[in-house]
Amino acid sequence: MSWWRDAAIYQVYLRSFADGDGDGVGDLAGLEARLPYLRDLGVDALWLSPWYDSPMADGGYDVADYRAIDPSFGTLQDAERVIGAAHQHGLKVIVDIVPNHTSDRHPWFQEALRAGAGSPERERFHFRNWPNNWQSRFGGPAWSQVDDGQWYLHLFDSTQPDLNWDHPEVRAEFTSILRFWLDRGVDGFRIDVAARLVKQQGLPDKPEEHPDLPSFADGKPAADKDRPEVHEIYRDWRRVLDSYGGERCFVGEIWLDDPERFARYLRPDELHTAFNFAFLKCAWEAGALRDVIDRTLATHAKVAAPPTWVLSNHDVTRHATRYGREDTAFTGRLHRVPSDLGLGTRRARAAALLSMALPGGVYVYQGDELGLPEVFDLPEEARQDPVFRRTAGLDLGRDGCRVPLPWGGEAPPFEFGAGGAWLPQPREWRELTAARQLGDADSMLSLYRLALRVRRDEEALGDGGMRWLESGEGVLAFERDPGFTCVVNLSRREVDLPEGAPLVASAELGEAAAGPARLPPDAAVWLRTGN
Ligand code: TEU
């Protein structure tokens, strides 16, 4: 079976992972030094957020050169060394590819500015004499004006001009970029904004826009429609990827609510997998989760693609914080909503076991394994996410889930590096450092390490089928073959467990008067059942 069908994939947000050269920004040297930590954590693969040469207006999702590494991260040689070292540790490497837009510093955009209105250089982007009513996903209009009066389209920041995917040179350039990295041994690509590359012909106004509402504030995508022509691109890309042989994969970032449209990307000649954002967004509520799980399985079954289970990433409020709120669904980033972190952390532990027990692949965003909460009280001058600026602070943005990792020690920067951290870490994180958690059998890190090891060893886990078991109100219980049961208690009361030997539990199990143990609220357990 192909590794990507059931892989546990760890997302490395490079500039916040580990700093090797002491400039306060994570880099390849830092990552290389921490590869043994990732191997011992028990993940199968790494997904690295963009490492390309970039002015970092959007944390590297604004690429100036797709074939060079940003100097703050290292060199191309460093990247090649990290790919090799990861492979030696048994870790696959997935890199991020950003095809929807470039940086405004990309030579193509610079040439387009110089060449002027009506030039062929401008045709690689979307230049117009007048903007339409589209809104940027980061707030504000999706158009900016250049000196000669023309406007260019940017679905994100104004420093991220959208490419024109009807242009043959754009298509050729990206298959060449894929080859460049495949030649260097990467095992796959995470495709940024995968559903949006192709725009509607003529770029007509969208009737459903609310120009005064930043799209981030209500969590709704600007327009939840993709274009059918985008699938040709991925069929092309798939041919390139397959020509390299081996077991390589694509994972699409596809925020589409419509399961039919979503599944089209996972047809056998397109992408292998896509992030399950329906699961990420779902409330900590048994009925809602069960619905999402059922819908996920049904959607993927039709195209024989493995589902993925995602709780957090570098764009959303960390789930330890989300799950401690009264409303536990992710409907958009909310910043001034109180959270009971104790409760959120208990639920995050249970959610980790749930996500790792379901059929398919699972994603771990760096710091999930430490139970990191969202950080809200960052000083304004430290904030770098363009969302903060573009919404005039209405949405504080995503910096709060990107605070550099605490590795050890008693005070910031907690061994992130020798020279501070580009975003300040809370003092309380001394309780959450990796070093401290390694020495504590009850820590989040110990739970992740144990669960990932068991997940790898258990034949029942990973890709395959599952069956729901009859369970009480507020309880999710399912079986997988051979001999594995997962029970998650989302109710307010302790519940009886079915027969079985506990393999991993997210909380201490209660004593039962007779028979098997009992599961406390907001906890999950894996049981070995049958013979
Ligand atoms: O994100 C695309 C995107 O649309 C998400 O940001 C999503 O809409 C939002 O987070 C929901 O709250 C990708 C990258 O993951 C993100 O970091 C980049 O900023 C963005 O593309 C532009 O490249």
Image (cartoon, rainbow, N blue to C red):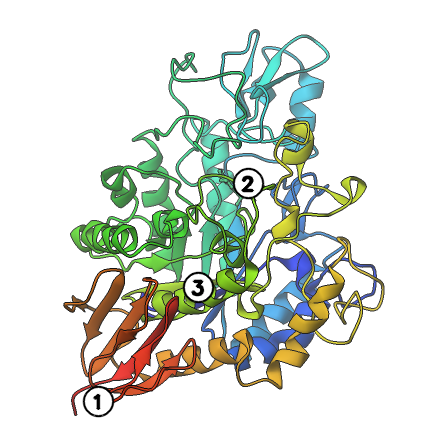
Can residue 245 be seen at all in this image of the molecule? no
Q: Nearer the viewer, residue 271 or 292?
A: 292
Label 3: element kind: helix
Q: Extreme bottom residue here? A: 531
Please rate how many residues cluster around mark 1, counting C-alpha atoms within 10 Å: few if below 14, some from 14 to 19, many from 20: few
Please tell me which residue is depicted at 54% across the width and 82% down the height of the picture: 40
Q: Position of residue 463 (x, y in %)?
A: 27, 69
Residue named by callout 3 = 347
Q: Quadrant of the N terminus?
A: bottom left
Residue 19: image quadrant is bottom right
Residue 438 is drawn in which quadrant? bottom right
The amino acid type, in three-letter code, at marker 1 is Gly
Question: Does dot 1 land on a helix, a strand or a loop?
Answer: loop
> Which residue is label 1 attached to?
515
Image quarter (top left, top right, bottom left or bottom right) of the C terminus: bottom left
Location of residue 274 in the rendering, given as x and y in whole percent from the top left corner: 36, 51
Is residue 306 shown left or right of residue 470?
Answer: right
* Above or below 164: residue 145: above
